[in-house]
Image (cartoon, rainbow, N blue to C red):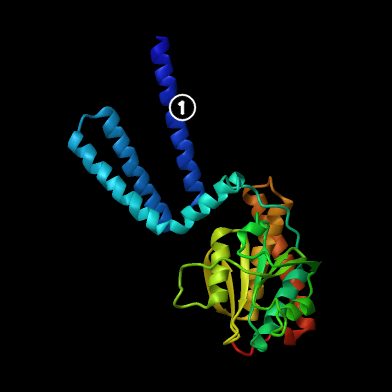
Amino acid sequence: MNFWGIINLKFLLDVLFAIGFGFLLFSRVKEQRTLWLLRGYLFLVSSAWFIQRYAYLPLTSKLIDAVVLACSLSLAILWQGELRRLMELLGTGRLAVLLGNPPKEFRATSTTITQLVDTAGKLSQNRRGALIVVDLGSDLRPEDFLYSGTNIEAQLSTDLLINLFATDTPLHDGAVLVKGNKIISAGVILPLSRQGISRYGTRHLAALGITERFDRCICIVVSEETGTLSLANQGKLERPITSSRLQELLVNLIGSQNSMGMNKSSLGKNSLSQNTNVSDNMISDSNEKVTEKPAIFINKNN
């Protein structure tokens, strides 16, 4: 009896661990097509395990094993970026990111949005290339960049951002890292994305590369050739956009992160209503700033 009890306990733990691991994978995958691929792959693996354990079907088992192996190789090619990111997180000991850690405390005001849109509008009018990384509470570290840049630790301002991207300064080719109401560093070299290499320039590929790795990180891109504005979020690039569209996107993204930071434990309808209230307040505040300085948000190149 004890022997069979141990066997059943091991089997129960095995099933529970497998279910927990599968639930973790499903909770971290957000793209619908990737979710379908993952479901199909796990179904094949489960079928192979069930046939090997409970049914004596040697030929069927061999065929399913071959299909699972072929699918594993195919997924390794399709998900090479995600697998590389997984290895990086495991190597740096950031398991909390894999488990869906809550966002770090993030504080930004309507002035932050106004200054970012103001800067992007002026740089766009002058066709001056720029790349601004806005950290929305992710776990960004210096080792996540190819080069961590020069430490600034200054209060966010439009004039300072414009000066950092001046063509005669040594930091204009890199990215500027902004968190909350502060400029953290400048001249940051970001990892490049492998998607759209033939369509996008270096700045756009860098914006895609960092937002693919961190979902609580967005990038504002100003094209040096055309002056068009773009916004990268979660590995997707929206371009071209107007200054008013950029303001709308920033209000939604920064407003939602502010609400999550202030109400980490609130869920459901309460959290949704608070996010809406914060976003509405930011929109009204930003619109007041726009009426005071209407020329800031005019993008002649759109």
Horizontal arrangement in the rendering, residue 207 relative to residue 183 (left or right): left
- Coordinates of residue 125 in the picture (x, y in percent): 66, 88
Residue occupied by mark 1? 13
Label 1 crowd bin: few (<14), some (14–19), many (20+), radius 10 Å: few
Measuring 39% from the left and 58% from the top, which residue is drawn there?
78
Total marks drawn? 1
Q: Quadrant of residue 93?
A: top right
Query: Which sits in the foreground, 88 or 225?
Result: 88
Horizontal arrangement in the rendering, residue 245 relative to residue 39 (left or right): right
Q: Quadrant of residue 280?
A: bottom right
- Coordinates of residue 69 in the picture (x, y in percent): 30, 47
Q: Quadrant of residue 176?
A: bottom right
Up/down of 13 relative to 27, above or below: above
- Coordinates of residue 50 in the picture (x, y in percent): 30, 33
Measuring 77% from the left and 65% from the top, which residue is drawn there?
181
Query: Which sits in the foreground, 161 or 218?
Result: 161
Horizontal arrangement in the rendering, residue 88 relative to residue 45 (left or right): right
* Residue lying farthest to the left in this orientation: 59
Q: Is residue 60 visible?
A: yes
Up/down of 104 relative to 7, above or below: below
**Quarter of the rendering occupied by the C terminus:** bottom right
Up/down of 199 relative to 80, above or below: below
Up/down of 9 relative to 190, above or below: above
Q: Is residue 274 visible?
A: no
- The kind of residue tagged 1 is Leu
Query: Which sits in the foreground, 51 or 187?
Result: 187
Measuring 20% from the left and 33% from the top, which residue is drawn there?
57
**Quarter of the rendering occupied by the N terminus:** top left
Looking at the rendered structure, the secondary structure element under dot 1 is helix
- Coordinates of residue 238 in the picture (x, y in percent): 54, 73
Measuring 67% from the left and 74% from the top, which residue is drawn there?
247
